[in-house]
Amino acid sequence: MSSSPWRRRRFSTSGGDGRLIELVLTSCRFVQRAVGVDNSAAMLAMAEHRFQDEPRATFVNGDLRDDITGLGMFDVIVSGFAIHHLEHRRKRRLFAEISSALSPAGVFLNLEVVQSASPSLHHQFLEAIGRTADDPEDRLASVSDQLQWMTEAPLAEVDCHWKWRGFALLGGRAAGQ
């Protein structure tokens, strides 16, 4: 197995309707197992239907507000537009749980909605994505706060890999390697 994190075999993602898992399984044929987690019966049903002929994909009814450590160990954990709905205290605990669920040399990536640097920039972001207001369930945190929480988790080599207005890709590696 290559040292690249994308050559790993076990992959987890926050679930939704399975689009993120589909992207990974299509692009990374070497992935042996992908686990999606969601607490919406409708989303799980859509994901299970989408993957009815794909034995590598499994979906679990779970809530990111609850402890995720019972899901197992993973080489890669990815979340797409889910963690920003959690209270900040829970985000910090979740990052620690993710850190403990990563195999040695494992990687965590989080594509997320983040807090803008100013109200004016946030307004411009909302305008750019065609919204007039935030989702009432959003609990936005700054990139710097989230990178600090990930470091404290502990995750290593945490960074913001990409940012456009209020969207960011944050990531880190399992600590101790």
Image (cartoon, rainbow, N blue to C red):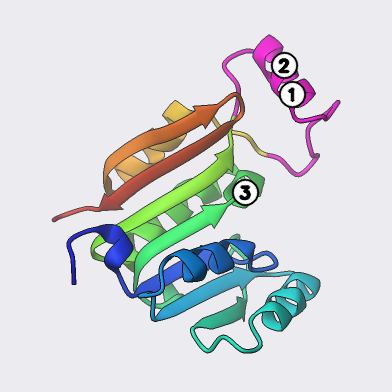
Residue type at tag 2: Gln
Residue ID for mark 2: 124
Q: Quadrant of residue 8?
A: bottom left
**Residue, far right:** 132
Residue under label 3: 81
Q: Where is 155 relative to 100, above or below?
A: above
- Discs 3, 1 touching: Cβ within 8 Å: no
> On the rendered image, what quadrant is the N terminus found in?
bottom left
Nearest to N terminus: mark 3 or mark 1: 3
- Magenta residues (range): 115-138
Estimate the x, y position of residue 105 in percent, counting from the top left: 21, 60
* Residue visible at 47% across and 55% down in the picture: 94
Residue 37 among those drawn in magenta: no
- Relative to residue 2, is residue 133 drawn left or right? right
| Disc 1 residue type (three-letter) | Ala
- Mark 2 closeness class: few <14, some 14–19, many ≥20 residues within 10 Å: some
Residue name at image x 47 percent, y 57 percent: 78
Residue 159 seen in the figure: yes
Residue at image location 52% in from the left, 35% down from the top:
168
For mark 1, what is the residue?
128
Instruction: Tell me which corner region of the image, top left, top right, bottom left or bottom right, holds residue 162.
Output: top left
164 up-or-down from 90: above or below: above
Asked if the residue under mark 1 is in contact with the one under mark 2, i.e. CB atoms within 8 Å, the reply is yes
Q: Nearer the viewer, residue 118 or 81?
A: 81
